[in-house]
Image (tube, rainbow, N blue to C red):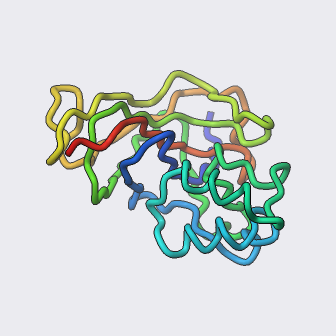
């Protein structure tokens, strides 16, 4: 099989008081389609702080009359729209190793994972396969458990097959999820 998988990396922090974002490969960012789907409150939060936790976005959604739950799925890519991020879609091959770098300004205890998600399932995105990586974070100053990558820089390998789901741009994303709590 020599076909390309098209994935867009998504950054999400759920439900956490900590903050982190993937810096490599490119992640979704707000653009002109974001306010139309998610409203100006959520779009402005993400423009001001791309590490905003999803709990802040849910809070803002309740008071913004322009928020449209049907078109702004906060669980998937923080509601950020594919059409704003077409230049960030990455072609990958089955079995390809992908380098991921995460930057965080508030390390915290918790659990993190990266998985391939089918974006066409709604309202809950479908995890297509086992998480590509999962680990615990257990430090107020870094990521010092035996299972955590040093400095949040690690590689994941795509499965040999994703059942033909990810052959069109936008059908799938690599989703970063981080559950945890801030340690003081």
Q: Residue farthest to the top?
A: 130
The N terminus, quarter of image: top right
Look at the picture and state if 148 lies above or below 153: above
Count numbered badges in the picture.
Answer: 0
Between 13 and 174, the residue placed more toward the observer is 13
Q: Nearer the viewer, residue 143 or 115?
A: 143
Q: Position of residue 9 (x, y in %)?
A: 54, 52
Kindly identify the residue that appears in the image at 55 percent across and 55 percent down: 56
In the figure, residue 84 lies in which quadrant? bottom right
Tell me: 90 left or right of 180: right
Q: Is residue 156 above or below residue 163?
A: below
Q: What percent of the width, then of the height, locates residue 141?
A: 14, 48
**Residue at screen point 28% across, 59% down:** 105
Q: Quadrant of the C terminus?
A: top left
Which residue lies at the image location 82% right of the left edge and 67% below the top edge?
66
Q: Residue 75 at what x, y percent from top left?
A: 64, 43
Q: Residue at x 27, y 35 (%)?
A: 109
Depth check, front residue: 163 or 151: 151
**Residue 137 spot, x, y in % from top left:** 26, 34
* The quarter of the displayed image where residue 61 is located: bottom right
């Amino acid at each position: 099989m020599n076909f390309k998988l098209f994935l867009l990396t998504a950054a999400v922090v759920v439900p956490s008081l900590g903050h982190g974002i993937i810096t490599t490969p490119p992640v979704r960012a707000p653009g002109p389609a974001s306010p139309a789907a998610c409203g100006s409150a959520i779009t402005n939060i993400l423009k001001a702080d791309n590490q905003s936790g999803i709990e802040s976005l849910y809070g803002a959604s309740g008071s913004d009359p322009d928020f449209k739950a049907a078109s702004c799925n906060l669980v998937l890519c923080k509601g950020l729209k594919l059409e704003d991020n077409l230049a960030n879609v990455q072609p990958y091959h089955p079995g390809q190793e992908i380098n991921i770098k995460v930057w965080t300004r508030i390390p915290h205890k918790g659990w993190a994972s990266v998985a391939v998600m089918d974006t066409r399932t709604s309202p809950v995105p479908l995890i297509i396969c086992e998480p590509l990586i999962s680990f615990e974070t257990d430090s107020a100053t870094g990521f010092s458990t035996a299972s955590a990558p040093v400095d949040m820089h690690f590689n994941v390998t795509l499965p040999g097959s994703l059942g033909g789901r990810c052959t069109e741009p936008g059908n799938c994303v690599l989703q970063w999820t981080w559950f945890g709590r801030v340690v003081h």
